[in-house]
Image (cartoon, rainbow, N blue to C red):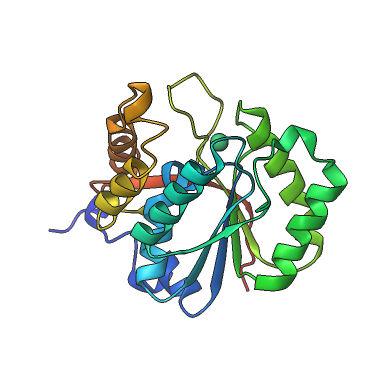
Amino acid sequence: MKRACDTELRPSEQSIVHRYAGKTVVAIGAHPDDLEIGIGGTLAKLQKNGAHVVMCVASIPKDFDVRLAEAKRGAEILGCELKLLMDDGPKRLEDVKTCDLVGMLDGLIREYKPAAVLTHSNSDFHNDHLLIYRACVPTQRLAYFDFFSYHPTNCRPVPIDFHPNAYVDISETIDAKMHSITAHGSQFGGRGLDTEMYREHAHAMGRIIGVPYAEGMQIQRMVLA
Ligand SMILES: [Zn+2]
């Protein structure tokens, strides 16, 4: 006899891939590697299933050419379009006026007309990530896109107050995610940091929804029409 807990919880018509197939999804990260770490498996899954996925990297603080090449490689592995918001050389987000940053992100929304925007969260501990999240919030006044925050991204784990309430099964794209993270060689291998914790984290998220690997997000706004 089938028990309640054996019930299929995720009928395919409810899948995120159906929600955004044929539409544009814009993912925004403060730096190269944030998107691969935070939401790379979801982006690859969406792209594979017919969404137009734009990976917007807001800034490259230093080592511009190296990190731009790594960002291009990361986006290529995930099959997504790369957009560098501040493409005229090294820039620190702290040096940009908030109103200018909001203006640039407004331009991004007007250009791509996304069905969904995925960005950092208010729970992040990196000030650049918080600046991007806070500059993304007001772009919601321009159009009715879904708005999600992905898990805080870091090179070394620290305690954070982030509680996902939406999960994406990334079992099919975990290898692409891991591959895209290692494309950022200047951030990991060169600094003696290993990337395996991102696979372990995705595995722990997967256990919450009963799949091998998952990414968790916070829903900030979702239109249930
Ligand atoms: Zn970052």
Q: Quadrant of the C terminus?
A: bottom right
Residue 167, visible in the rendered structure: no
Which residue is at a point 81% across and 61% down the rendered structure image?
A: 141
Residue 103 drawn above or below residue 216: below
What is the quadrant of residue 37 in the picture? top left
Q: Of 166 and 111, which appears nearest the observer?
A: 111
Identify whether 165 is placed above or below 53. Answer: above
Q: Depth check: 166 or 17 in front?
A: 17
Residue 172 visible here: yes
Residue drawn at x 42%, y 32% is 187
* For residue 132, side relative to residue 46 (left or right): right
Name the residue at 65% across, 53% down: 87
Q: How far across and down, in percent of the image, does residue 88 sit?
A: 68, 51
Where does ligand 1 appear, by image quarter?
A: top right
**Looking at the image, which is closer to me, 177 or 46?**
177
| Position in image of residue 113 (x %, y %) | 67, 73
Task: Name the quadrant of the N terminus.
Answer: bottom left
